[in-house]
Image (cartoon, rainbow, N blue to C red):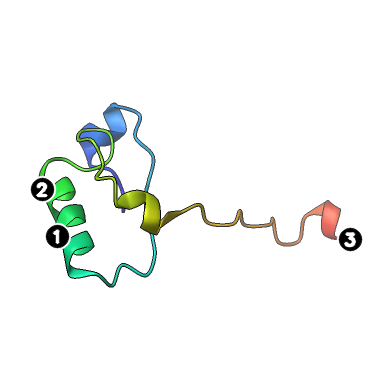
Amino acid sequence: MQPSAAGRAAVARPVWLGTVNDAAATADIAAWVRAGGPGLAHPPAVLDLYSFTPPRRSAAGSSRDA
C-alpha cells in the first residue's frame, strides 16, 4: 500500500501486506487506511502478522553480473 501525498510528506514508506485472509484483519486494515494510512495514522497491531519486506531487485545487466 502506497502512502498518500500527505503520508509521503510525513516521510512514510510503502507497506507491503500478504495473505490477509481474515475478515477482522481486513476490517482493521481498512479502518487504518480510512484514518490516513502510512505516515498519518497508527497502524493496527494486526499489521505485524501480515506485513513483509520485499526482496530488493537486482540490477539486470550490471557489471557485477558479468
Work out whether residue 63 or residue 3 is closer to the camera in this orientation and state it. 3
C-alpha separation, residue under disc 2 versus residue under disc 3: 47 Å
Which is closer to the viewer, label 2 or label 1? 1
Mark 1: few/some/many CA within 10 Å (<14, 14-19, 20+): few
Q: Quick one: quadrant of the C terminus?
A: bottom right
Locate residue 10: give its quadrant: top left
At numbered mark 1, what does the secondary structure look like: helix, strand or loop?
helix
Instruction: Give amino acid for label 2.
Output: Arg
Work out whether residue 48 or residue 16 is closer to the camera in this orientation and state it. 48
Instruction: Give amino acid for label 3.
Output: Ala
* Mark number displayed over residue 27: 1
**In the rendered image, which residue does mark 3 sit on?**
66
Q: Are marks 3 and 1 in contact (CB under 8 Å)?
A: no
Locate residue 41: give its quadrant: top left
**Image location of residue 63, percent across then percent down:** 84, 53
* Mark number displayed over residue 54: none
At numbered mark 3, what does the secondary structure look like: helix, strand or loop?
loop
Locate residue 8: give its quadrant: top left
Residue 47 is left or right of residue 31, and the answer is right
Work out whether residue 41 or residue 66 is closer to the camera in this orientation and state it. 41
Q: Earlier in the sequence, mark 3 or mark 1?
A: 1
Q: Residue at x 52, y 56 (%)?
A: 54
Q: Is residue 1 above or below residue 8?
A: below
Q: Residue at x 23, y 42 (%)?
A: 4
Q: Residue furthest right?
A: 66
Q: Earlier in the sequence, mark 2 or mark 3?
A: 2
Instruction: Give amino acid for label 1.
Output: Ala
* Mark number displayed over residue 34: 2
